[in-house]
Amino acid sequence: MIHGGLKKGLHECAKALDRRAARLCCLAKDCENDEYKKLIKALCAEGEVHVIMVESGKDLGAYCGLAKLNEDGTIKKAVRTSCAVVTDFGEETRALSVLLDFLQKHADGAEI
């Protein structure tokens, strides 16, 4: 989010995937709309974008910063999102290297 490289929701994600600007896609397993999942997976396959499946949309929303936190840092309320796309990873860090290594090892579809 800091570098402006995060897109959330079907409309933003589909536009980024269609323009081939996406580098990584996260999709919630508990998304109830099968057409939604098929569209995102097809766009990812067409653009050769890695897909990471996340257990729940609330978790994905919290990962994207769509959550209100308590004073102690625990999540008080999270907004659900079914899809998020990273278009810009930002600066090169150790965490980015670990993520890219993970994606290369699990090229067929990772789950977290």
Image (cartoon, rainbow, N blue to C red):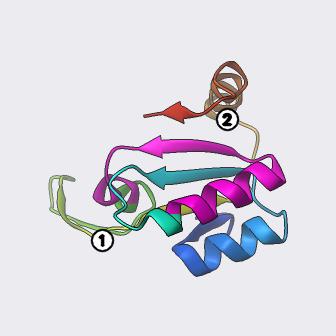
Pointer 1: what residue?
79
Which residue is the extreme one toward the top?
105
Amino acid type, mark 1: Val
Q: Which residue is mark 2?
A: 96
Q: Main secondary structure of the magenta part?
A: helix
Q: Picture quarter containing residue 4? A: bottom right
Q: SS at mark 2?
A: helix
Mark 2 neighbour class, 10 Å CA radius: few under 14, some 14 to 19, many 20 or more: few
Residue type, label 2: Leu
Q: Position of residue 80 (x, y in %)?
A: 32, 68
Could you tell me which residue is drawn at 31 percent across and 51 percent down? 56
Instruction: State the residue at coordinates (69%, 35%).
Output: 93
Between marks 2 and 1 in the image, the one whose residue lies nearer the viewer: 1
Residue span colored magenta: 37-60
Q: Nearer the viewer, residue 82 or 42?
A: 42
**Residue 62 in magenta stretch:** no
Q: Name the element at disc 1.
A: loop
Locate residue 101 relative to residue 83 in the image: left or right. Answer: right
- Tell me if I can see residue 75 in this picture: yes
Query: Where residue 64 sits in the image (x, y, percent)?
Result: 45, 61
Tally the numbered discs. Answer: 2
Q: Residue at x 51, y 68 (%)?
A: 36
Residue 45 lies, in percent from the top left, at 75, 49
Q: Closer to the N terminus: mark 2 or mark 1?
A: 1
- 43 within the magenta span: yes
Mark 1 burial class by Cα count in 10 Å: few <14, some 14-19, many 20+? some
Asked if disc 2 and disc 1 are in contact, CB closer than 8 Å, the reply is no
* Residue 89 visible within the image: no
